[in-house]
Image (cartoon, rainbow, N blue to C red):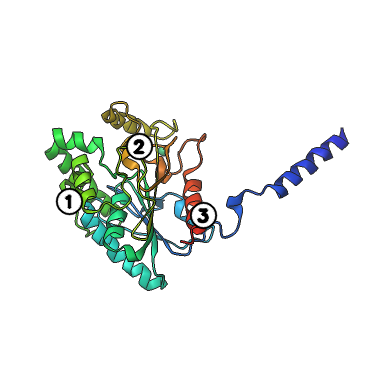
Amino acid sequence: MKNRFWQYVSIALIAITAFPAPSWAAGYTQTKYPIVMVHGFLGFESIGPLEYFYGITSGLRSGGANVYVTTVSAANSTEARGEQLLTQVKQILAVTGAAKVNLIGHSHGGPTTRYVASVRPDLVASVTSVGGVNKGSKVADILMDNAPGVSTVVLGAVANLMDIVSGNTGRPQDAKAAMTSLTTAGALAFNVRHPDGVPLSACGEGAYQARGVHYFSWSGGKQITNVLDPLDAPLALTALAFDGEKNDGLVGSCSSHLGRVIRDDYAMNHLDEVNQTAGLVSLFETNPVTVYRQQANRLQGLGL
Ligand code: CA
């Protein structure tokens, strides 16, 4: 009995030393260029202790990445947000002395990062779009088709509130411009002007590289993922807008595609993609923080 116990212990020790999890390795997320995070519609950098990219920035930093979290208007057009991001990217390059940045954008942050890469590809090593509204959202279509006035007033008020509580007062908010950018028609018009990385087919992959910039995307395809998260139910409701098409509650899986599609069917909803609410995500799926860390490691492998 005693011998068997020590047999198990030695097998366990050999297993641990022989197969170390690669993500434990020092420098696992250490990219050549700084990583710049960009929030979505109605997003923020942090509200008190609650970061938008909950636990993700620290997860990336713990493996050696140099991470910057930016703030753009919670509600505004993709171009207006993109110009605000471009200013911050230039500041980050000046501070760090880096030649380029790796941009990671969630939701409306996807098109926002694409704008910067489109107008200044020389400053961008990669764009990673997470749950990106790259071909619009059917939720935005329904709201703008049926109740544009009420929608923009309500969402404008929420945007102003988000701006105040996150301590970033003063950025221009324009909910109508934001919602127009997020509709299918608005997104497609944007894609004509800024096509890099956008799939040419309805649901395929886009170019992995365009004008020197690498393009990636991933998204979830589920709504109810954690019974404790009060925001799962509202996402199950908005998911009805998609009429059976795979979606994360706010963005269709096909719309999220950009460049190389890592996956479009994680058991994650739109908020799980940024590890919200406060880490309440599926226990049966790869943790969102791990997915971001894997992406940093992928960028590292490409010398970015
Ligand atoms: Ca959640």
Q: Are marks 2 and 3 in contact (CB under 8 Å)?
A: no
Q: Amino acid at mark 3?
A: Asn
Q: Amino acid at mark 1?
A: Asp
Q: Amino acid at mark 2?
A: Ser
Can you tell me whether the CB of the residue at mark 1 lies under 8 Å from the nearest atom of ligand 1? no
Q: Which residue is mark 3?
A: 297
- Residue 237 location (% of width, % of height): 30, 29
- Residue 126 location (% of width, % of height): 39, 57
Q: Identify the mark nearer the N-term, 1 or 2.
A: 1
Foreground tag (3 vs 1): 3
Pointer 2: residues within 10 angstroms few (<14), some, or many (20+)?
Answer: many
Label 1, secondary structure: give it.
loop
Q: CA distance from mark 1 to mark 2?
A: 27 Å
- Residue sitting farthest toward the left: 149
Rendering quarter of residue 167? bottom left
Q: Which residue is mark 2?
A: 253
The quarter of the rendered structure image containing the N terminus is top right
Number of numbered discs present?
A: 3
Pointer 1: residues within 10 angstroms few (<14), some, or many (20+)?
Answer: many
Q: Identify the mark nearer the N-term, 2 or 3.
A: 2
Label 2, secondary structure: give it.
helix
